[in-house]
Structure formats: structure tokens, C-alpha cells
Image (cartoon, rainbow, N blue to C red):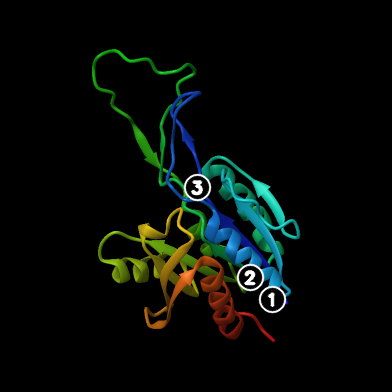
Amino acid sequence: MARILITSGPTREYLDPIRFLTNASSGKMGCALTEAALAGGHEVVIVSGPVSVAYPQDATLFSVISTDEMLTIARREFPKCDGAIGVAAPCDYKPVRVADQKISKTGDGLMLDLIETEDVIATLGAEKEHRWIVGFALETEDHRFRAITKAEKKRCDLMILNSPSAMSSLTTDVELLDRGGRVLARYQGSKSEVSRQIFEMIGKILIPK
């Protein structure tokens, strides 16, 4: 059996004490993958941004807010694990400066100065050594090409391609790609059922018997 790190949910990057950048990731897929992993007898460590779902109590949960926090905890926990699944949707950008007070309306437009956040899964991929990584790619165009590019860049052993329609939904439709971009399987249905099928493939390919 394996000890698996799962990143889940969105992150938040605050502009001021009230407002923040984020996305519609609900944590439902991360929760479903955790349930599937536990059902398979694996140990799970979750690093999750703010979500309303309740993760299984048998998993070890670390709650974070920002992408930097998710990266810090994931890097700390990954060496204790056999592999990682990056299903979280961390913010890709953060403000250069966070205002101390609420930004008030002035009647004029507001220009935001943003910089890229560090990529959580790419960082783990660069440090993975003997461990394995499964990534998720959610794209709106050139879906498979972008997923394959991400798999190479982030040194993922498997990449799961899904679509924006899956966010906050109870169902999903995914393709499972190997590191060379070959489609190994396509799954669709409830996130619980798809997660079970994903773990069957992970068990066959990545987890030693």
C-alpha cells in the first residue's frame, strides 16, 4: 500500500483584506480521490485550499489559503509519501503588493500588478526522485496538446485531462494520458466512480504490488 499526497481545491490570493483572486474549484474531485485511495487501503495526506466539502476523517488534512502555503506544506509532506496527485487548482497569479486596507472605489479603473505564483506540481516534479506524480490539466483550448506539454514540464507520470464543466459538478469526463501523451483510458460519470477507475489504473502502473 502507498502513502499518497493529494492537493485539492482552490487557493486565494488577496488583493486587500476583503478581496481575493480565486477560481471555482470545489474540492469534490480531491475528496472523491481521497475516498477511492482510502478504500484501496492507502494512506492519504491532503493539502487543501478553502472548500466546503468534508474530507474523510481517516485522511490527514492540512488546510491552506494561498498558493505559497500549499507549496510549502506539499514540499514538506511529499518526501514522506510514495506519490502525489495534483488535483488542486492553485491561483497562477498573485498581486505584487497587498493593500493594508480595503481598496475603495474612486470612479476610475483599477490596474492590478500581478506576478506568477510558483507551480506546486512542477516544483514537486523537480524534486520527486523515486516518487511518482499524477497531474490534472483543465484546459479551454488545445486540450490534449496543452495537457501533454504540462505532463512533460511538470515531470508527471500520468496526466488527467478534464474540462471546466467539471468544476463544482458531481460528474466529470476525463482522459488519462501517459507521459508520452498516449491516451490510456477515458472515464466519465460521477466523480466517485471516475476516481475509483483512476485509482485502478494508478495501482496497475505506479504502485508496486
Q: Which residue is mark 2?
A: 36
Which quadrant of the figure contains the C terminus? bottom right
Location of residue 79 in the rendering, given as x and y in whole percent from the top left corner: 68, 62
Q: Earlier in the sequence, mark 3 or mark 1?
A: 3
Q: Nearer the viewer, residue 62 or 31?
A: 31
Badge 3 amino acid: Pro
Name the residue located 51 percent from the left edge and 23 percent from the top edge.
17
Q: Earlier in the sequence, mark 2 or mark 3?
A: 3
Location of residue 37 in the rendering, given as x and y in whole percent from the top left corner: 65, 70
Badge 2 amino acid: Ala
User: Which quarter of the picture shows residue 8?
Assistant: bottom right
Crowd tier of the residue under label 3, counting other residues whose Cα lies within 10 Å: few below 14, some 14–19, many 20 or above: many
Q: Nearer the viewer, residue 11 or 30?
A: 30
* Count of residue discs: 3
User: Which quarter of the picture shows residue 19?
Assistant: top left
Badge 1 amino acid: Gly
Q: Is residue 170 left or right of residue 53?
A: left
Q: Which mark is residue 40?
A: 1
Crowd tier of the residue under label 2, counting other residues whose Cα lies within 10 Å: few below 14, some 14–19, many 20 or above: many
Q: Decide: marks 2, 1 in contact (CB < 8 A)?
A: yes
Q: CA distance from mark 2 to mark 3?
A: 21 Å
Query: Does dot 2 land on a helix, a strand or a loop?
Result: helix
Q: CA distance from mark 2 to mark 1?
A: 6 Å
Q: Is residue 82 visible?
A: no
Q: Which mark is residue 10?
A: 3
